Image (tube, grey):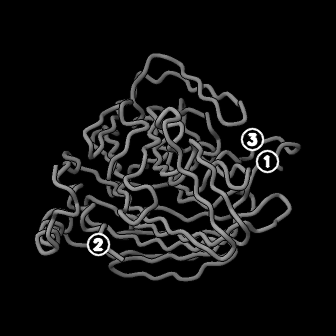
Amino acid sequence: MPSIKNIGLCALCTAFFATSFAQKKQAVQVIKVDKENKVNILIGSKPFTSFLFPDTLEKPVLYPVHASNGTIVTRGFPFTPLPGEPTDHPHHIGIWFNFENVNGLDFWNNSFAIAADKKNKYGWIKTDRILETQSGNTGVLSYHANWTNQANDILLEETTRFEFSGTEHERIIDRVTTLKANTTVLFKDAKDGMLGLRVAKDLQIPTKEEKKFTDDKGNVTSVKAEAASNGNYITSAGKEGDAAWSTRADWCKLYGKMGKDSISIAIIDHPSNINYPTFWHARGYGLFAANPLGEAIFTNGASAKNLQLQKGESVTFRYRIVVSDGKKTPSAQQLNQLAAAFAVKK
């Protein structure tokens, strides 16, 4: 498989536009709903997703996420649970970005389910202002947020820019997040991070066995068997199914059938990201995450990747998410082309 770096820029652009954007781009609307702390994103006049940042939520999220045919590809729980849908891991909401161990605080696992007397072990991401909204062929949403402890002391300032685009059968989110340290900050190598999404039940990998997962505090979460689902993972390195978990690759795709249509969701890493290519925290039960800072557990302790920022220093993470519908999901070649085009994007 050719490396992204070995694809010439002209050939790269030609292939990219021939495969991904042969279809006409649809207009994107980015609409603020101030009284609800919400921004709605519509593509082709149809709902795509909403950016939610209410004070009652421990982090901002994109929720729900629709494919271009209207199918909701993210789990409904806890906001709009569906019959028979799993209710494990209540912190898995739509699409989010955070980490399990920042100066000892757990931003990843924080949710309404944490008891009040234990909340001091967890962190919040509080969006304090929307910086930009723009509609057009590409929709833009930028915001500023603070990563805080329970006492509202700021560890990190976050600035995130989303670019949304789409065609008749495809939706793309390009996310650029910069974290600036307000004090000395240590991201200690941990399993749960950084960019995550929780998919609908149909896209889980089918299993007949209940599984248990333990977080870094010893909390055990049981995930029920789900034999009726039909999802599957494949990575740019050729790993499939449950074998994708803990491996490194430029991209990872989850695909399956929802209703009468095929659906796929791909996450693409960027060469400028720390510890590229990322490790995939891709679980069969529906957690789909890219985590470059979970090396210790993903390599069984063979190596680790901690990240320390001094006050005033910053780090930037870039990711592309591609949601596709239709009878044929993007091939490995097409995803390589999308990844190559993303790699040269500033």
Query: Residue visible at 75% across and 58% down?
Result: 56
Depth check: 111 or 75 in front?
111
Res 331 label: none
Give the CA distance from mark 2 to mark 1: 39 Å
Picture coordinates of residue 171 (x, y %)? Answer: 34, 61
The residue that label 1 is drawn on is 121
Of helix, strand and loop, which one carries label 1? helix
Q: Quadrant of residue 19?
A: bottom left
Number of residues whose C-alpha sits closer than 10 Å to that of mark 1, classed few (under 14), some (14–19) or many (20 or more): some
Give the amino acid at mark 3.
Ala
Res 344 label: 2
For the C terminus, give its image quadrant.
bottom left
Q: Earlier in the sequence, mark 3 or mark 1?
A: 3
Query: Residue visible at 37% across and 53% down?
Result: 277
Q: Quadrant of residue 280?
A: top left
Depth check: 4 or 145 in front?
4
Picture coordinates of residue 43 (x, y %)? Answer: 37, 69
Number of residues whose C-alpha sits closer than 10 Å to that of mark 3, classed few (under 14), some (14–19) or many (20 or more): few
Above or below, comparing residue 336 to residue 207 in the picture: below
Number of residues whose C-alpha sits closer than 10 Å to that of mark 2, classed few (under 14), some (14–19) or many (20 or more): some
Give the amino acid at mark 1.
Lys
Marks 3/2 in contact by CB < 8 Å: the verdict is no
Of helix, strand and loop, which one carries label 2? loop
Give the amino acid at mark 2.
Val
Above or below, comparing residue 135 to residue 207 in the picture: below
Q: Earlier in the sequence, mark 3 or mark 2?
A: 3
The residue that label 3 is drawn on is 113
Give the CA distance from mark 3 to mark 2: 41 Å
Tag nearer the camera, 3 or 2:
2
Picture coordinates of residue 45 (x, y %)? Answer: 38, 70
Of helix, strand and loop, which one carries label 3? loop
